[in-house]
Image: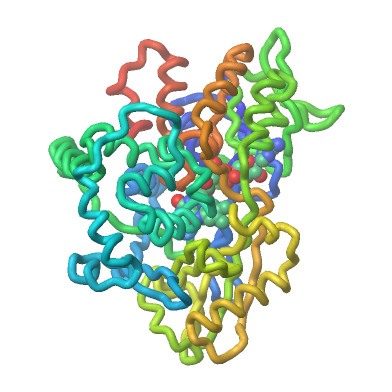
């Protein structure tokens, strides 16, 4: 079976790597001149800038297995433990997010009334049925409206660059909705789930919960995958359409050039690009994919001399609730998080702008973006000099929003594509947006495809591919 993967971001690369490992013939195609998609690490004058994702968070089991398989374990770095401290801006001041009961009682991030309301969470009855709920409504119902506006809203800016009033709770954070379903409340659901996990985890698979990157940035992993798949990858090859013919599928590059035939096509591009690709197979699927929103995001790196910054930069960074009406979403203290991010005596900040609340960023050039970012950080972090280094990365369509109706939209698109058997949607608009979720989804799809390819092959034989 010859498989074509359109898109060589982390999703496509991991899928290609796992399929080839199992002996499948794969070809990857990417319109860009370099593989990796939004995962890009660039070192300019000693400032190591992540143009897309900065950290892989959580247990990151799939990423860690991949790291081992690629022989990159010595290049992996865990975040400075101080990074557990995160700030939120409220009424113009930065406050640490409380991480222990005393800090919780003392924090000004929530009123006394809101804190009491949080304690009532286990007693709020579980929602039995009704219309799909937004993330904001879900959190307001369970934990109170102040938690939704002061804590959830900035958190969602940090993860989705999104608006929690439009995101679907079930689609964007399925595990959260699941906690309520299994435990009756988030509190009891979390306890049940922690006990269940402890029982199931094999001792050698236990890893510390942390945040990860690599000495030279996250681009290390996509770089290693891309090198390993160089013989199977065509870069600078944007696919314009997928055509079905009697001997298989063909990928059109332009009116004259095409590649094929392929028995299976996996699409790992963004939703708008996927829509164009499937248009010739199903206009209904294309319409559904086109309806997925991807707000613009700009990433601005700023370098300063350490002594010019009044703030201790003792943590992960800070996030800003939309109610603060600032022109940035948040800031990472990049050189506090990982070593090797800035030259000696300097610090590196990564400022995020745009997202669902600030779509006007799409029309701004690099200079006004630096000006906006600088104005905010100079005030909030007490910086007394102009930036010594700046760099802007603009993503016109950054992160897919799993808004209300998302799961139904994907189901309708997939259903419409059953008319084109062997064509699979596997971009970041299905299965989660984080790097770890992308690696997990690609691993799982690889297993499924290998089992379809060799139906006799049992789960035991695929462990080298599944790794769990
Ligand atoms: C600014 C930003 C910050 C983020 N921060 C984090 C973070 O800190 N932690 C985290 O876990 N996640 C983060 N994410 C999310 C995560 O990085 C992405 O969801 C993930 O990397 C997407 O990978 P992908 O391979 O699915 O898609 P992409 O990386 O978008 O790759 C898709 C590929 O398809 C190619 N392509 C598109 N159209 C065509 C075509 N017609 N023909 C051929 N090729 C085509 C593109 O060139 C691209 O290489 C962030 C995302 C962004 C944008």
Residue farthest front in this picture = 113
Q: Can you say whether 161 is above or below 380 in the image?
A: above
Q: Quadrant of the C terminus?
A: top left
Towards the viewer: 248 or 56: 56
Q: Quadrant of the N terminus?
A: top right
Residue farthest right in this picture = 255
Residue drawn at 59 percent across, 52 percent down? 356
> From where the camera sits, is residue 438 visible?
no
Residue drawn at 43 percent across, 58 percent down? 149
In the rendered structure, the answer to whether residue 287 lies left or right of residue 93 reads right
In which quadrant of the rendered view does residue 109 lie? bottom left
Q: Position of residue 16 (x, y in %)?
A: 52, 34
Q: How many marks?
A: 0
Residue drawn at 41 percent across, 76 percent down? 94
In the rendered structure, the answer to whether residue 60 lies left or right of residue 269 reads left
Q: Position of residue 290 (x, y in %)?
A: 67, 34
Q: Can you say whether 104 is above or below 297 in the image?
A: below
In which quadrant of the rendered view does residue 340 lie? bottom left
Towards the viewer: 419 or 368: 368
In the rendered structure, the answer to whether residue 247 lies left or right of residue 437 reads right
Q: Position of residue 201 (x, y in %)?
A: 18, 39
Q: Can you say whether 286 is above or below 75 in the image?
A: above
Towards the viewer: 4 or 420: 420
Residue drawn at 61 percent across, 17 percent down? 416
> From where the camera sits, is residue 280 visible?
yes
Q: Position of residue 326 (x, y in %)?
A: 57, 69
């Amino acid at each position: 079976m010859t498989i074509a993967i359109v898109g060589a971001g982390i999703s496509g690369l991991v899928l290609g790597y796992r399929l080839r490992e199992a002996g499948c013939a794969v070809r990857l195609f990417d319109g860009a001149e370099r593989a990796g998609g939004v995962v890009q690490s660039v070192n300019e004058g000693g400032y190591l800038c992540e143009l897309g994702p900065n950290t892989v968070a959580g247990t990151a089991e799939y990423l860690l297995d991949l790291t081992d398989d690629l022989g990159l374990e010595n290049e992996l770095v865990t975040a400075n433990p101080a990074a557990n401290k995160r700030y939120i801006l409220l009424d113009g001041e930065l406050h640490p997010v409380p991480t222990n009961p005393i800090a919780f009682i003392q924090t000004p991030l929530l009123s006394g009334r809101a804190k009491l309301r949080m304690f009532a969470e286990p007693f709020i009855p579980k929602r039995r049925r009704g219309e799909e709920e937004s993330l904001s409504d879900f959190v307001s119902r369970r934990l109170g409206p102040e938690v939704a506006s002061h804590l959830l809203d900035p958190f969602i800016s940090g993860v989705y660059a999104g608006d929690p009033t439009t995101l679907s709770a079930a689609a964007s954070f399925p595990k959260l909705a699941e906690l309520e379903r299994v435990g009756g409340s988030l509190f009891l659901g979390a306890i049940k789930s922690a006990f269940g996990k402890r029982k199931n985890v094999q001792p050698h698979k236990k890893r510390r919960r942390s945040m990860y990157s690599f000495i030279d940035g996250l681009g290390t992993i996509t770089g290693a995958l891309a090198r390993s798949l160089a013989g199977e990858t065509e870069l600078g090859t944007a696919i314009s359409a997928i055509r079905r013919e009697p001997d298989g599928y063909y990928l059109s590059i332009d009116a004259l050039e095409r590649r094929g035939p392929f028995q299976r096509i996996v699409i790992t591009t963004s939703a708008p690009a996927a829509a164009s690709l499937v248009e010739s197979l199903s206009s209904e699927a294309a319409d559904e994919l086109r309806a997925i929103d991807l707000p613009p995001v700009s990433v601005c790196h700023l370098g300063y001399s350490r002594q010019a910054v009044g703030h201790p930069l003792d943590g992960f960074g800070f996030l800003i609730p939309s109610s603060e009406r600032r022109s940035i979403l948040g800031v990472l203290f990049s050189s506090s998080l990982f070593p090797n991010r800035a030259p000696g005596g300097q610090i590196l900040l990564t400022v995020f702008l745009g997202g669902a609340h600030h779509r006007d960023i799409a029309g701004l050039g690099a200079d006004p973006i630096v000006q906006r970012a600088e104005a905010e950080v100079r005030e909030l972090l007490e910086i007394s000099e102009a930036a010594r280094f700046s760099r802007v990365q603009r993503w016109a369509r950054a992160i897919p929003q799993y808004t209300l109706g998302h799961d139904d939209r994907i189901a309708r698109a997939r259903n419409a594509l059953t008319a084109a058997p062997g064509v699979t949607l596997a971009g970041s608009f299905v299965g989660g947006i984080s790097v770890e979720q992308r690696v997990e989804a690609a691993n799982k799809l690889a297993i499924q495809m290998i089992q379809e390819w060799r139906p006799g092959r049992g789960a035991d034989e695929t462990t080298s591919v599944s790794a769990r």
